[in-house]
Amino acid sequence: MVSDRYVPTSMVLQRIDGVDLDFLWQLNAYAPRPDLAVILRADPAVLAARLAARGPHTRFERAPGASQVESRLYQQAAERLEAAGWSLLTVDSTRVAPEEIATTVLARILTLRETLQPR
């Protein structure tokens, strides 16, 4: 299954709304853990420029300083997930073309698939 949102995004967006990280962690304690979680990161200034170019899609993106806040919270979420033993791929998209990001993620998925298949 591929999903664009779940525990990592919950650990960011709900924290923007003021929900405590430990509470969120408890809420998701029994959620199925993915074989791989992918977090795309970028320099907050680059994120802000991208948002300005395309326009915000959500209320989170409209908030002042949203790029800086989201970047910081995604870093904290990644650290928490890694500490909990999650299989995590963090890709810095600051200066990387979308095609290269897709290639990186696909390569990791294919490697993971090989290790998970019964022999």
Image (spheres, rainbow, N blue to C red):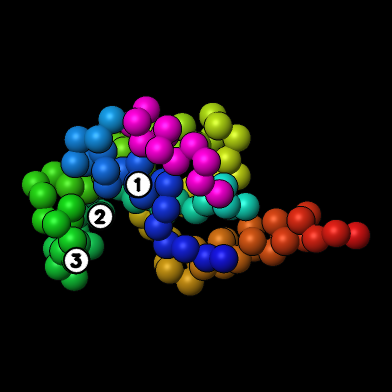
Identify the residue at image location x=25%, y=35%. Answer: 19
The residue tagged 3 is 57
**Which of the two residues, 56 or 51, is positioned nearer the viewer here?**
56
Labels 1 and 2: the sequence-earlier one? 1
**Is the residue 67 above or below the residue 18 in the image?**
below
- The disc labelled 1 sits on which kind of residue? Ser
Magenta segment includes 110: no
Q: Is residue 25 magenta?
A: yes
- Find disc 2 in the rendering and name its residue: 47
Compared across the picture, whether 80 is left or right of 94 comes to right
Query: Left or right: 73 with respect to 29?
Result: left
- Residue 87 pos. (x, y %): 60, 44
Quarter holding the C terminus is bottom right
Between tags 1 and 2, which lies in front?
Answer: 1
- Judge the density around disc 2: few (<14), some (14-19), many (≥20) Cα neighbours within 10 Å: many
Q: Quadrant of residue 108?
A: bottom right
Residue 109: x %, y % from top left:
64, 61
Of pointers 1 and 3, the one earlier in the residue sequence: 1
Which of the marked residues, 2 or 3, is nearer the chain's N terminus?
2
Q: Quadrant of the N terminus?
A: bottom right
What residue do we see at 54% from left, 29% from top?
83
Q: Residue at x 78, y 54 (%)?
A: 115
Instruction: Say which residue label 1 marks.
Output: 10
Q: Is residue 89 visible?
A: no
Secondary structure found at label 3: loop
Amino acid type at mark 3:
His
**Measured Cα–Cα span from mark 2 to mark 3:** 13 Å
> Left of 90 or right of it: where is 27?
left
Label 3 Cα neighbours within 10 Å, binned few <14 / some 14-19 / many ≥20: few
The reply to whether residue 102 is visible in this rendering is yes
Mark 2 lies on a secondary structure that is helix
Q: Which residues are magenta?
A: 21-32
